[in-house]
Image: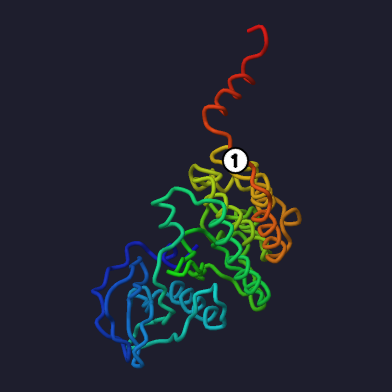
Amino acid sequence: MSLDFQADQRLPQEPPLRRLGTYEIEGVLGQGAAATVYRARRTDGVAVAFKVLHRAAGANAKIRDAFQHEARILLKLNHPNVLRAHDAGLIDGYFYMALTLVEGQTVEELLTHTKKLGETPAIDIAIQMTSALAYLHELGIVHRDIKPANILLNTRKRAILFDFGAAIDLRVEQPVPGEVYGTPAFLAPEQARGDAQIDGRADLYALGVTLYRMVAGRKPFYGSRGEVLEAHLLTPPPPPSDFAYVSPALEAVILKAMAKEPDARFQNAADMAAALEAARLAPATPQPELPKRILDWLRNAISPGE
């Protein structure tokens, strides 16, 4: 789970900051239970997204450690499709991260307005995410919370992965057995079980669910937290074409990414990217007009002689 979901929801709210160290704060971009993200300006005039842990949250060892863990991971990263951290530390009792300021919106915000995306933009976003994931996985980092709300689209349509609050660096640590990190609707089965070992294929599963959401206009599983986790473990996802037109080539990519067993999925991000490119280049299958589809369904539903 991300940092703000780990936070105690009863933490007292704090008044917004005006300045912290050499950072001049210009406004609030977002606020959670544990941290506030400000728009701030460095002394060199560059605007940044300035994530500041509330003092009350910083006094909680678990929350503080999670915040610092995220900062340590982000400071290692430099990829065009990954949000970059420029600085992190402690000023006047506040733990902070200075991040690249991205003007745009998340994929989740976009879907709120459009419900679903066409195949071409969805594939484009997914291919950019496979580039980010190939980079992360080569470094031994598993994000563990791939979802539309954690993908930013800037004004040039570049997709940027952010929120590394659930990320794990497998070179220096392993998952805690029995603990479930991430967002239930997008969790790979091994994450839903709280397995002691995971790898980058868990992120590819979540990217498959994200693709499903982008083209079908809905997630594959709904229900309580327990019901959704159980569905990831036991229930085959309904084909996304049950809910919207999805080409056979793209549907095959989505369902392979969402295979229950990691060995049945794409084995790395490059393989998934190649399959997505092939799906993008596949000849378009004409979508039947709605009246004809209804007529065909009625013909198939009524047997001769009835």
Residue sitting at the far right: 263
* Image coords of residue 69 (percent x, y): 51, 77
Q: Residue at x 33, y 74 (%)?
A: 56
Q: Residue at x 68, y 10 (%)?
A: 304
Q: Residue at x 46, y 72 (%)?
A: 62
User: Which of 178/134 is in front?
Assistant: 134
* Image coords of residue 90 (percent x, y): 39, 87
* Image coords of residue 224 (percent x, y): 48, 44
Is residue 179 depicted above or below 214 in this figure?
Answer: below
**Other-residue count near label 1 (Cα within 10 Å), few / some / many at <14 / 14–19 / ≥20:** some
User: Which image quadrant for residue 22?
Assistant: bottom left
Is residue 155 depicted above or below 206 in this figure?
Answer: below
* Image coords of residue 110 (percent x, y): 42, 56
Query: Tell me, what colour scheme is on the image?
Result: rainbow
User: Which of 39/234 is in front?
Assistant: 39
Q: Residue at x 37, y 76 (%)?
A: 53
User: Which of 180/36 is in front?
Assistant: 36
Is residue 39 depicted above or below 217 in this figure?
Answer: below
Left/right placement of residue 182 relative to residue 3 reads right
- Counting the numbered discs, the total is 1
User: Which of 195/248 is in front?
Assistant: 248
- Three-letter amino acid code of the residue under disc 1: Ser
> From the image, which quarter does the C terminus lie in?
top right
Q: Which residue is mark 1?
A: 241
Asked which secondary structure carries label 1, the reply is helix
User: Which image quadrant for residue 16?
Assistant: bottom left
